Image (cartoon, coloured by chain):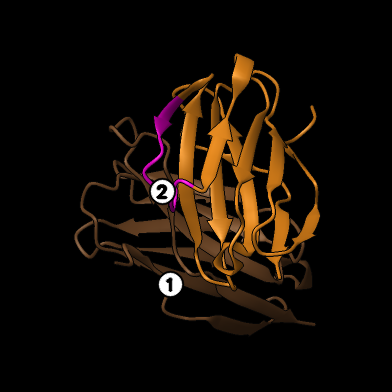
Amino acid sequence: EAGVTQFPSHSVIEKGQTVTLRCDPISGHDNLYWYRRVMGKEIKFLLHFVKESKQDESGMPNNRFLAERTGGTYSTLKVQPAELEDSGVYFCASSQVNTDTQYFGPGTRLTVL
Amino acid sequence: DQQVKQNSPSLSVQEGRISILNCDYTNSMFDYFLWYKKYPAEGPTFLISISSIKDKNEDGRFTVFLNKSAKHLSLHIVPSQPGDSAVYFCAATEAGGTSYGKLTFGQGTILTVHP
């Protein structure tokens, strides 16, 4: 069974540009989460989808971040316009309905110059 | 407001000995706890979990202990192997609550196991 996949693995952009990260969860997992780790600190929750609906987006830093999960399969996280403080590793995770164990993807390392 | 804390940034142990990683939490609503292991340039890998109705859970060389009254949990690895060298994250969640599934992580502990 394929794990959670994320694309791209690395992205380097300039301040003010737009970047879109993609996450493909494990097949059949209705729950999809986005997290971010900045500068070697703790991994912080961004938001949670159940199928195509946003269940909890309390961790989204501001309105420059837009997450979508059309059709309840893969998800995208767009940052527009990117700022220097957006640099970090963005992780996606998925889980089956009514379970707590989340399985993480390899992450996308975003560098904003 | 750091609700999950791993106060030891690093731990170094000899191969074959026991590794003990500690984690403290402040939110009394947390009732499910997980440990993840992370290698460089990879995502966190689920290791072991424990529900608040238990005080111990074992899986092979890994055992997690939970002390609810002290809001403290620990991960024991016995015997430690060089391949266990990684960053270990403690995470907590309110299982089935309104924030169902949202994990709150500690800062991580870098474990180094020397041959």
Instruction: For label 2, count other residues whose C-alpha is less than 10 Å away and answer few (under 14), some (14-19) or many (20+).
Output: some
User: Looking at the picture, does residue B50 appear above or below residue B63?
Assistant: above
Quadrant into which the C terminus of chain A falls: bottom right
Disc 1 vs disc 2: which is toward the camera?
A: 2
User: Looking at the picture, does residue A19 appear above or below residue A68?
Assistant: below
Evaluate whether label 1 is on the same chain as label 2: no
Determine if the magenta segment contains residue A40. Answer: no
- Name the residue type under label 1: Gln
Look at the image and give the colour of chain B: brown
Q: Which chain is orange?
A: A
Relative image position of residue A74 (x, y in whole percent):
68, 26
Relative placement, left or right, of B66 versus A2 is left
Quadrant into which the N terminus of chain A falls: top right
Residue drawn at the location 32% of the way across and 30% of the way down: B96
Determine if the magenta segment contains residue A59. Answer: yes
**Residue at the far front in the pictured view:** A16
Disc 1 marks which residue?
B6
Q: Nearer the viewer, residue B50 or B80?
A: B50
The chain to which mark 2 is attached is A
User: Looking at the picture, does residue A94 appear above or below residue A113?
Assistant: above
- Name the residue type under label 2: Gly
Relative placement, left or right, of A8 versus B73 is right
Question: Magenta part of the protein: which range?
Answer: A54-63
Relative placement, left or right, of B4 versus B18 is left
Instruction: For label 1, count other residues whose C-alpha is less than 10 Å away and answer few (under 14), some (14-19) or many (20+).
Output: many
Residue drawn at the location 41% of the way across and 39% of the way down: A57
Disc 2 marks which residue?
A59
Q: Nearer the viewer, residue A94 or A12?
A: A12
Which numbered disc covers residue A68?
none
Residue drawn at the location 43% of the way across and 51% of the way down: A62
The chain to which mark 1 is attached is B
Task: For the residues labelled 1 and 2, say whether their Cβ atoms are less than 8 Å apart.
Answer: no
